[in-house]
Image (tube, rainbow, N blue to C red):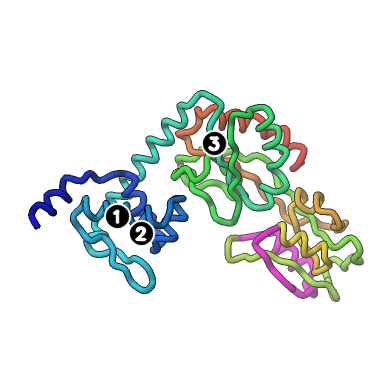
């Protein structure tokens, strides 16, 4: 028994195992941790056992709902997070000093921005710098710049931490659209029409509130958190939709209404972690953005 304890103490605690520990703390299942870290399920289980052996403690209790921290496991969460921040800071700092235009550039944005605004920008960038592999991450989740989930992000809200270098890129204008074959609704009324709205549980959308106030007698018929879905539903004649003009004007089968007032506009913000400010592939990408945004978001 003593030999087993001594053998466990001699094992080294590795950062890769601490990453798995934190992933399991955050998602609660081996499968979820494996997906988050892009590892196999058996690898996660094996490395978790190695970490338990290195610490000599049982860190999780398996329950019907997943893995729950034991008292011993709870005591090291903050230390593991400090270790994570240190490792990520080293990774960002070393990446920021990379001078060659090669490697991967991860870009995150909303779905519609990735589908309608980024393609010509990415085409121009990859043609100019073929050694860089570009990865586009889209969705409603805000990918973490501090944890290198993304190198550069585009959002319609400012970034709220001091370690992010951010810049307001352009004003995002919206338009109101109906199916090309639909009649014009009466502004200030909307009787006989339906509305396509947004899932407002994920944030505040002034354009959606404006749409409902501008057509108070139109009936909300569906909502979606995806502007692409809204545009396609509008094209099918489901209802009136307010869309970024970059989406509405590029969707065949839609017609923008000529109204006495326009929906409120918003800003497009670009941000990246300050440790990456010298990363050449990032600086080169920023260098091609302005011209394209002037064309797509005038």
The quadrant holding residue 121 is top right
Q: Which residues are magenta?
A: 204-227
Q: Which residue is mark 3?
A: 104
**From the viewer's perspective, is 8 left or right of 138?**
left
| Pointer 2 with pointer 1, Cβ within 8 A | yes
Disc marking residue 77: 1
What residue is rendered at 45% in x and 40% in y?
163
- Give me the residue at 74% from left, 73% from top: 220
Q: Quadrant of residue 23?
A: bottom left
Viewer-closest of 67 and 224: 67
**Residue 183: x, y in percent?**
91, 66
Q: Considering depth in this image, is 111 or 35 the residue closer to the camera?
A: 35
For the image, the number of numbered tags is 3
Q: Residue at x 71, y 66 (%)?
A: 197
Residue 191 image point, x, y percent: 84, 75
Q: Secondary structure at mark 1?
A: helix
Element type where label 2 sits in the image: helix
The residue at which mark 2 appears reads as 25
Q: From the viewer's perspective, is residue 201 above or below residue 277?
A: below
- Whether the residues at callouts 2 and 3 have beta carbons within 8 Å, the answer is no
Query: How far apart in space, not on screen, are marks 2 and 3 (Cα)?
Result: 28 Å
Q: What separation in Å lies between label 1 and label 3 (alpha carbons)?
A: 30 Å
Upstream in sequence: badge 2 or badge 3 = 2
């Amino acid at each position: 028994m003593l030999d087993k304890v001594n053998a466990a103490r001699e094992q080294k605690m590795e950062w890769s195992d601490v990453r798995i520990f934190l992933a399991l703390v955050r998602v609660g299942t081996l499968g979820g941790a494996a997906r988050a870290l892009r590892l196999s399920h058996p690898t996660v289980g094996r490395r978790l056992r190695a970490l338990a052996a290195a610490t000599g403690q049982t860190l999780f209790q398996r329950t019907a709902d997943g893995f729950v921290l034991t008292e011993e496991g709870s005591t090291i969460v903050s230390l593991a997070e400090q270790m994570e921040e240190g490792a990520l800071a080293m990774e960002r700092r070393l990446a920021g000093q990379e001078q060659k235009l090669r490697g991967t550039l991860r870009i995150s944005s909303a779905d519609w921005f990735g589908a309608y605004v980024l393609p010509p920008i990415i085409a121009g960038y990859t043609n100019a710098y073929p050694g860089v592999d570009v990865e586009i991450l889209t969705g409603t989740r805000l990918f973490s710049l501090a944890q290198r989930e993304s190198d550069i992000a585009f959002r319609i809200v400012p970034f709220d931490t001091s370690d992010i270098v951010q810049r307001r890129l352009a004003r995002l204008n919206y338009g109101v659209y109906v199916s090309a074959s639909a009649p014009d609704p009466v502004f200030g009324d909307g009787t006989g029409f339906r509305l396509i709205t947004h899932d407002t549980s994920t944030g505040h959308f002034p354009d959606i509130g404006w749409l409902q106030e501008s057509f108070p007698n139109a009936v909300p018929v569906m909502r979606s958190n995806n502007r692409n879905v809204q545009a396609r539903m509008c094209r099918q004649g489901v209802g009136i939709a307010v869309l970024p003009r970059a989406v509405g004007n590029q969707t065949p089968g839609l017609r923008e209404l000529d109204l006495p007032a326009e929906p409120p506009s918003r800003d497009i913000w670009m941000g990246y972690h300050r440790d990456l400010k010298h990363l050449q592939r990032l600086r080169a990408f920023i260098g091609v953005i302005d011209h394209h945004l002037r064309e797509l978001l005038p």
